[in-house]
Amino acid sequence: MWYQSKFNFKRIILRNPNFLFFDILIPVLFYLLFTKILSDDMGFKRDYLVSMMIYANLLGSVLTVANTLVNDYVSGYAKSLRLLPVKQWQYYISVGSIFWLLNVFCVIALGLTGWLFNGIVFSVKLWLILVGIIPLLATPLMLIGVLLAQTHDINTVNILGNIVFLLAIVSGLWFPFKTLPHWIQIIGGHTPVYYIAEIARELVSGKMITWDYLVGVIIWSLLLGSLIYLIEKTIARTC
C-alpha cells in the first residue's frame, strides 16, 4: 500500500503540474481578484478565503479525481492492477490519499495567500484543524469525482465536470450566499459544498460546529458511496 501510494504521488502530482495550476493557482487568483476589487473589509476577506479553500478542494476532488481515474481506465493501468494482488478498495484508498494530500496543499496555499496579501493570521491550532478537517470533509466531493469517472469517457467527464462551477455558484463560494435568489438558496443550502463551507467558516470564526451540517456531509458521503458501489456491481455483472 505504501509503495503504491508513493508511486501514485509521483504520477498524479509530480508528473502533472497542471493539477497544481488549476487546483491551486486559479482559486488563489480568484481570491486576490475579488478581495482587492470588491471590498476592503477584513471579515469579507476571511470568509472569502474560506470559500476559495473549499473551491480549491472542489476542483481537486471532482475534476482532478475524475480525470485521473478515467485516464487510468483508458490507459489500462486500472485493469493491469487486477493482475496483481491489489484489491479495488486498496486502489481507491491509495489514490484517495494522494488527493487528500493535494487538498491539504490547496488549503495551505490559500492560507499563505491570505496572510501575505491581506494580513489574515490563523493560530497554529486553527491551522492544524483547517488543514486536517477541510480535506477530510471533502470526501463527498471526491466521491462525486469517482461517480463521474464511472462513465469511462474523458469527454463525458469534461462535460459533466461543469457541475463544479454550478456547485460553486449555488453554494455561495463565488458570491455571498445571502445575495443569491431565494430559490437558489433552497437548492444550494442542501449541497455538500454548502455544508463543508459553513463548517469551515464556523471553525474560523471560533463558533461551535452546527451538527446538522456535519450530518449532511455524512449522508451525502453514504449516498454517493452506495451509488458508486451499485454502479460498479452492475458493470461487473454485465462484463
Image (tube, rainbow, N blue to C red):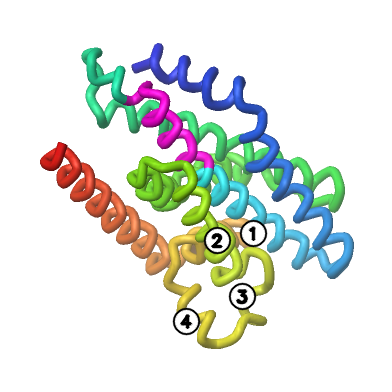
Magenta part mainly helix, strand or loop? helix
- Tag 2–tag 1 contact (CB < 8 Å): yes
- Residue 239 appears left or right of 148: left
Q: Which mark is residue 143?
A: none
Q: CA distance from mark 1 to mark 4?
A: 19 Å
Q: Which mark is residue 197?
A: 2
- Residue 179 appears left or right of 224: right
- Tag 1–tag 4 contact (CB < 8 Å): no
Q: Which residue is tagged 3?
A: 177
Q: Mark 2 belongs to which amino acid? A: Ala
Return the x and y of residue 212 as percentages of the image width and height. Answer: 38, 69
Q: Which residue is tagged 1?
A: 51
- Residue 74 appears left or right of 49: left
Q: Which mark is residue 186?
A: 4
Q: Mark 1 belongs to which amino acid? A: Ser
Residue under the point 27% across and 54% down: 222
Q: CA distance from mark 4 to mark 3?
A: 11 Å
Q: CA distance from mark 2 to mark 1?
A: 6 Å
Residue 39: quadrant of the picture: bottom right
Mark 2: which secondary structure?
helix
